[in-house]
Image (tube, grey):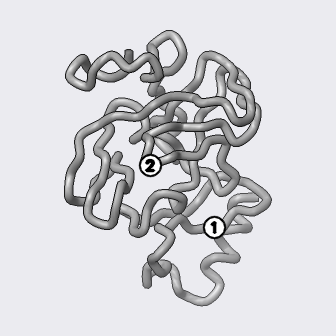
Amino acid sequence: MLYPDLFGKDPLFPKNSDFAVVFKDDAVGRGVMTYRGFNKGEVVARMAGHVVHDIRQHTLQLSPDTHLYDPYFSGFFLHSCSPNISLNMVDLIVVALRDIPANHYLYMDYAETEDVLFKQFPCSCGADCCRGWITGRKEMISGEILQPGYLSQLNQGLR
C-alpha cells in the first residue's frame, strides 16, 4: 500500500504494485504513474489523508473549509485540462474518465476540486482545450499575468 497503516487496509487503497509517485520532469515535478491499465468508468483507487483546515501543496478540497492532505498518492496527481481521472471528494474515489494504459500518469483537472489553488501556475498540458493558466474554479487569474498578450505568448510557447 502507498498509504501508511494508520489509514487502515481498505482494499481500494493504491498498491505499490499498481502505482508509484515518480519524478516526471522539471516543469511538473512528481506525478502518479500507473503500472496497470484501467478501463473508462473503472474505480482507480480510494484516497486517504489527513483532514486539515488550510490550503497546502498536495491538498484536495473536501469543503470550503476542509482539505485532504495526501502526501502519499492523490496529492501528486498531475494537472491536465483534458484529464484521464475524476475525483469524487465525498466518497474519496478516483474514477477513470477514459481508458488509461499501463505506464501512464494520472491527470486530473485541478479546477474540478479546488475553489482556490495553493499556487496558480502556467499550464503545460498541451491539450487542445488547454486554458493556459491553472486556477481554482472560483478565482481570477493572478495580476502578474494580466499583461496584454501574456496568454497568447504562453500558448505559443506550449505549441
Q: Residue at x 46, y 76 (%)?
A: 138
Q: Which residue is mark 1?
A: 132
Q: Residue at x 65, y 52 (%)?
A: 125
The disc placed on residue 89 is: 2
Give amino acid for label 1: Gly
Give amino acid for label 2: Met
Label 2 with label 1: CB-CB less than 8 Å: no
Q: Nearer the viewer, residue 23 or 51?
A: 51
Q: Is residue 73 left or right of residue 150?
A: left
Image quadrant in which the N terminus is located: top left
State whether residue 8 is above or below residue 82: above
Residue sticking out furthest to the bottom:
148
State whether residue 109 is above or below residue 116: above
Q: Dot 2 lies on which element?
A: loop
Q: Residue at x 39, y 68 (%)?
A: 116
Residue sticking out furthest to the front:
91
Q: Residue at x 59, y 36 (%)?
A: 106
Q: Is residue 3 left or right of residue 53?
A: right
Q: Is residue 1 left or right of residue 83?
A: left
Residue mark closest to the camera, 2 vs 1: 2
State whether residue 64 is above or below residue 15: below
* Within-10-Å neighbours for mark 1: few <14, some 14–19, many 20+: many
Q: Nearer the viewer, residue 138 or 13?
A: 13
Instruction: Estimate the x, y position of residue 3 in percent, counting from the top left.
Output: 32, 23
* Within-10-Å neighbours for mark 2: few <14, some 14–19, many 20+: some
